[in-house]
Amino acid sequence: MTIFEKNGVLKRCLHGLGIMMFVFWWSAAGQASETAAFPPRILYVNNLLGNDQWDGLAMEPGGDGKRGPLGSIRQAFLLAQTSDRIEVANTGKPYFGNNSLTRVGGTVERPLVINGNGALISGLGHVPGEKWKRVEEGIFAAFFVPHSNQIRQRSDVKSWIVDHPQIWWLDGKPGVNCKSAEELRSKEQGFYWNKERKEVWVRLSAGKTPGQVKIEMPVGEIAIAVNTDFVTVRNFRSMFSLDDGFDSHRGKNIVFQNCVATDECDQGFSCHGWSNVLYEDCLAERCAGSGSCDVHQCHVTYRRCVFVNNTFEAGVYVHDDTTHGYEDCLIAGNRPFEQVWARGRGKMNFFNSVLVGGKGSDQGIMLMQNGSVYFEQCTLADAPFICQLDNVQHGLLGMRNCILTRFSKMFFAAPESARQRLLLENNVYFDGPGVQFGGKMYGGSEWREYQTATGLDKESAWVDPQLKGRLQVELPKDSPLFQAGKRFGRPACVGAVLPASVWELYEKTRGEYATPEGIKRRDLSVADAAATAKLPPPSQPAAAAVAPAKTPSIPGSINGWPAAVRKVEYPSPADQSRQPALFYQPAKDQSAPLLVALHTWSSNYLQPEPFYAVWCIAKGWNFT
């Protein structure tokens, strides 16, 4: 019998907290009371039509030089008042990053809401010629220090050693990332981050100077940082931040919904101080730090979030005395380190989540120090091992109703002295050498001996879970494991079953890459993508995950919409007024279906959502 079975307090610290984290404090956060007696004041932002000298109180220019949308998110943050609503137009043109909301927030009855409508924020900026100095023939240098924690802090790292994100751009084309000055001298259009001198060096074509070309790299620090209370941020995408994507510093009751952070110089998401934050339906990918990194005393919940393919830290990372919940999350393929870093005394609780190791990595699933990590109904797979406990650190590990499979060296290792720090019950083990406990390896044939000798893994079994599907982590529909677990005395699933929306979010960013113009998809034109794409379900707006491709400027076209879409008017049966709308009709005689797209309540018929129209054009459907 372990100390967890003897001591109800410790057992509840892991198991009870694992439940509380996911249900108690934000059951209605995303739907916080936006139903007060009077509507909120709305500030409009549009980086094509707007001007920071205007008042922001109208969606379109008023013609008087005063009324109309603002041109930047930063200015909207400066003008915002308590419990305002900020509507950012998705124009297809990236907004600039470095946006911090500090002056005002919302209230418990009405949070301040910032709605991006799928808009893209970029930290990329043009570094003009006067910022560069000559180093030697053809090579020029400018000050540059990315906020990539591990790359900056590790003494063995001397340059920008990762190929993703691609942060150097020369005349709109990706520059070559060089790992040394010697390599740079042999490669035209190359870039080298001289970490010691805090400079980026660029080698230009013969006779060229920085003033004759357009050099772009990250200069905007954080896409959106919320440093106040009662704020909801939704439907944004960010890329190329010098620091992170979506952060909070000492903010309380903050919600980020449908926010996608890719190709950042550090983390996708990060919380500091005593922040109290919820992330829902968010994704972090190809960031040079972790997908998320939270420090100090913050309390953070991640619900239906995806952390994949981040390149020089962990998938999720906690430090100090933070408290975290991960519910219905996918954490996979982050490299070159572990998927989870539990450092300091932080507490991490995973419920119904999937954790898959980095391809070719020699690291375990988790690095653990002195806090506690608890997995309930999770699937862990594809790594050398989960973790290795020792006598130096004092972390607590709990795994209940979990599937542990495809581990090449061992499932986990622990000395005998760590027995009281383990809570292991009703798990399924398969495809691995075994559990290493007290220096002895217990495999499938020694499973009963392991349970008897250690008192661990009560009611756990060594059986094939027969996982299939995406990432080979999905249970077959007829699996007996759906009812094989136990939770509060009732049957429960063994292993994770992720919601469909999590897999959809993951699939939406496959094949994507970031450019100065925006997000693009490999080997797919806009028409091809539209012809093969499925229309998003109503509960998962397309704008939440992917910013629309930039629409060419065509004479006579409506901004943000294909040229074939035109403005029309129709009579309203309610008051006989003429109401404007957008319309597309295919050039053919036979009948075709009609797709009706509704704009959000805070916008109008010109709200740029061109994917629907592009899809109809490709399919030969009518659209309005």
Image (spheres, rainbow, N blue to C red):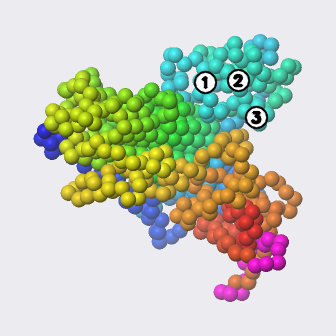
**Region rendered in magenta:** 573-591
Which amino acid does the dot numbered 1 rest on? Answer: Trp
Q: Residue drawn at (36%, 37%), measured in percent from left and top?
A: 431
Residue 71: in sight, yes or no? yes
Q: Is residue 582 highlighted in magenta?
A: yes
Query: In terms of image quadrants, where is residue 234?
Result: bottom right
Which amino acid does the dot numbered 2 rest on? Answer: Phe
Please say if 498 is above or below 314: below
Q: Residue drawn at (53%, 68%), measured in percent from left and top?
A: 39
State the quadrant of the N terminus. Answer: top left
Circle 3 — which element?
A: strand
For this rendering, which residue is in front, 158 or 109?
A: 158
Look at the numbered discs 3 and 1 and tell me whether their residues touch, using CB distance below 8 Å. Answer: no
Q: Distance between the residues labelled 2 and 1?
A: 9 Å
> Which tag, 2 or 1, sits closer to the chain's start?
1
Residue under label 2: 191
Residue 325 in picture, x, y percent from top left: 36, 46
> Which tag, 3 or 2, sits closer to the chain's start?
3
Circle 1 — which element?
A: loop
How many numbered discs sit on the rendered protein? 3
